[in-house]
Image: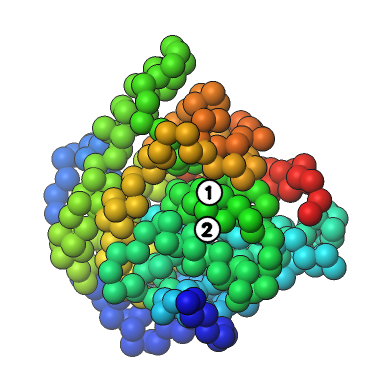
Amino acid sequence: MTAVHATRAFEVTWSEAEVARVLDRVATTRLPPAPPGSGWTYGCDADFLQGVQRYWTQDYDWRGALDRLNKYPQFVATIDGQDIHYLHVRGESPTPRPLLMTHGWPGSQVEFWDVIEPLAFPSRFGGRAEDAFDLVLPSLPGYGFSGCPAQPLGQRATARLWNLLMTEVLGYPRYLAQGGDWGAIVTSWLGLDHGVNVRAIHLNLLAFRHAEPPRDEAEGKWMQTALAAQQSLGAYSALQRVRPQSLAWAAADNPLGQAAWMLERFHDWADLRTRRFEDVFTLDRLVTNAMLYVMTGSFTSALWYYAAMVPEGMLVLPAGTRCETPTAYTDYADPLVPAPPRSRAERAYRIERWVQAPAGGHFAAMENPAFFIDDLREWAASLPAK
């Protein structure tokens, strides 16, 4: 029997003493040498990390970050014994249109800061009130202000919690769902397991696949490209999936080291074809995202989320199984997970919309918020009314 408890209002609070301790740890970290001129070749760029260290300890406005974190209504619900933190922003439309958006790693609710208000209150940005969404943005189990599970809890289990959150806690019998990175995997499981409640899903990463050889030249080239991407960018995943606690021990009580590990992902997975890394993400946003992990001690439990993927099947669907919930996919030229040919994707998903973004990479809502907003509005408008 499902145990769903009443929600409680939540506010982020950081004491002066807690922040002072973190800033002292950052300031006193002695960075090891790096090969001169190596840049990002062997990991986080040394010059960039030193700049982050200076900014974090000298210029970072943590009180302003707190104000931003508390800008929208947020709550904690206990579902099956698991505390789930979430933002719930009721849009301006008199007809609620619920949209569940799920972040990934090494992200957080910060990924969506630039898109929340335009999606919930479009008339403030020259749009139409009837296009508004009721937004629900949960923090993954073990991330941020969600509780740390006793054991690694995976993405399929998270989808079940999300469905209970939407239907039983918030009272939305039908809703839309969107996600990238882990969010795309959780959203895919929502579409596969909870299609009775999920009207349609929108992904910027296609997670499900079948264990089958390529059927044509295009699929063969994609498999080679995807394999090369994993070989060059995927070592972090293997470590976090197989030995997450080893990394946790190494990074323990080291805020700058934890940040360096995460900054490398933001750099390597962003679309840097026309912009520098420094022009894609602000230091304020990157440091605030790191603070969410550091201040909650969730760097470790976030790593566990990788280990939990293994017993759930590693996203390989049984032959003949497909996510039949209507699916939209937008290709943001993700360096980590190149888009497969549509023919292959359609064997795992009921693809009804396929869009090529003009710019942006793995962190779609952060890298190209204007396009992300328009794309979601157009997707929702294209769906049959229900």
Looking at the picture, how far across and down is residue 25, in whole percent? 24, 73
Q: Is residue 309 visible?
A: yes
Looking at the picture, how far across and down is residue 7, in whole percent? 56, 83
SS at circle 1: helix
Location of mark 2 (residue): 102
Kindly report the distance in space between the C-alpha atoms of the residues bearing marks 1 and 2: 16 Å
Density class for disc 2 (Cα within 10 Å; few <14, some 14-19, many ≥20) is many
SS at circle 2: strand
Q: Amino acid at mark 1?
A: Leu
Location of mark 1 (residue): 192
Is 172 located above or below residue 191 in the figure? below
Q: Quick one: quadrant of the C terminus?
A: bottom right
Q: Is residue 74 left or right of residue 370?
A: left
Report the front residue among 29 and 169: 169
Q: Is residue 223 left or right of residue 256?
A: right
Density class for disc 1 (Cα within 10 Å; few <14, some 14-19, many ≥20) is many
What residue appears at the point 20 percent right and 51 percent down from the top-left corner?
Answer: 242
What residue appears at the point 18 percent right and 39 percent down from the top-left corner?
Answer: 36
Number of numbered discs on residues: 2
Q: Please report whichever mark, 1 or 2, sits nearer to the chain's N-terminal start.
A: 2
What residue appears at the point 24 percent right and 42 percent down from the top-left corner?
Answer: 235
Looking at the picture, how far across and down is residue 222, in whole percent? 42, 22
Q: Are marks 1 and 2 in contact (CB under 8 Å)?
A: no
What residue appears at the point 65 percent right and 48 percent down from the top-left corner?
Answer: 200
